[in-house]
Amino acid sequence: MKKFYVPLLIFICFAGLYYSIGLLSRDKALFKPVWDIQHYVNISETGYDAHPCTPRDYPPGKVCGNVGWYPGWPLVMKAFRPIMGGSSQATYIFLSALLTLAGFILLYRFMDNVAGKTAAFFSVAALAGSPAGFYLLTGFPYALFLFLFAVYLRVFYSRTFRFRDIALVVLAIGMSLTYPTGLLFALVPFIHELVKRWKSGRYKLDLKRDGKTVFVYILPFFLGLLILWTYFYFKFDNFFVQLDFQARYHRTWSFPLTVIYHSFVGYPITSPENLVLIWYGLALLLFIPYKMKPELWVLGVVLFLFSPATGTTMSIYRHYLAAFPIYLIVGSSPRPAWYKGVFIAVGLAFSLIWLLPTFLDFKLI
């Protein structure tokens, strides 16, 4: 029963801390449909909208509306809203808490099975104590994304799960329809297969086995985006309307380390962007060698580099929250318990002293 009690206790402490601060704050920003949350709510209530930008729209561009956001979270909200009396706000508050708790439990169980109870505890604690962990309790899609990832781990590494292949396809599509970096999680089955080949010395192409790896494990991560863009084509007569929308934010491919360097040079060390760069960067450096499955730590490194590779560190504190394998790296490390505890405490301090107050002041996008 510890597989339930320990993550439940972590969640109670985590949610109790942030809910208490949120309720005591002046504007209750933790619970309001601020920033992107309002777009997710609008999509769930009235669907997608794309229209030519006007001089009043900011930033300026060709296409405005809400086509830049993914439909997974709005669809879940829409499905559960009738149960919550028709209130979108009550729906996303309830679902965020429920899915975060479920994600904590599933992550704990997975890590307990592969690395033991201590690793499981510190993995979940690292997630709860991360600098932007409070976003899990808001109307952003991170709680759903965490839940889908945790379920995916459970199914992917199980050989006895009924309807395993079907479940993996559905989960992969769901992840790619929930968050932009969902595509990158295709690295889990891809690297897993490469490692298996290397260990077994199998280098010849096997059409049946390799075909299953591609079509069941990898391609479904791209199928979600294809489904969304096909829907946009029939609704707006523009297959790439999402790319036209995103062009307003001037994200261009760049060398990630250069972007990180410019962030430290151009912004104070205590800026939310630089604080999370420090914490997640140290997580990857301090906990070498990684005692996690190769496909997971490779994904963690890629997720760390991907956001700055888009040319900016804007909102990177949120993006890094979804770098779930990094928490597993911390938890499974052979470093002493006190070492991990201090590191997690630093992340929580970053949250309570800098990021959360900025969010509650409506200044953290």
Image (cartoon, helix red, strand yellow):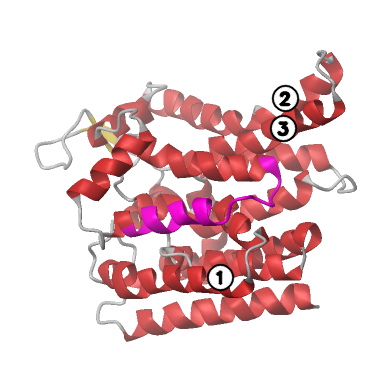
Res 89 label: none
Q: Residues within 10 Å of mark 2 (few under 14, many from 20)?
A: few
Query: In this picture, is 240 found above or below 83?
Result: above
Q: Which residue is label 2 attached to?
A: 215
Res 217 label: 3
Q: Are marks 2 and 3 in contact (CB under 8 Å)?
A: yes
In which quadrant of the rendered view does residue 29 lie?
bottom left
N-term-proximal mark, 1 vs 3: 3
Q: Is residue 276 magenta?
A: yes
Q: Is residue 41 visible?
A: no
How far across and down, in percent of the image, does residue 111 sit?
A: 72, 60
Tell me the magenta residue range: 275-294
Identify residue type, mark 3: Tyr
Under circle 1, the secondary element is: helix
Report the label total. 3
| Foreground residue among 290 and 54 | 290
Under circle 2, the secondary element is: helix
Query: In this picture, is 155 found above or below 352?
Result: above
How far across and down, in percent of the image, does residue 157 sit?
A: 79, 46
N-term-proximal mark, 1 vs 2: 2
How far across and down, in percent of the image, does residue 239 sit?
A: 42, 22
Q: Which residue is label 1 attached to?
A: 339
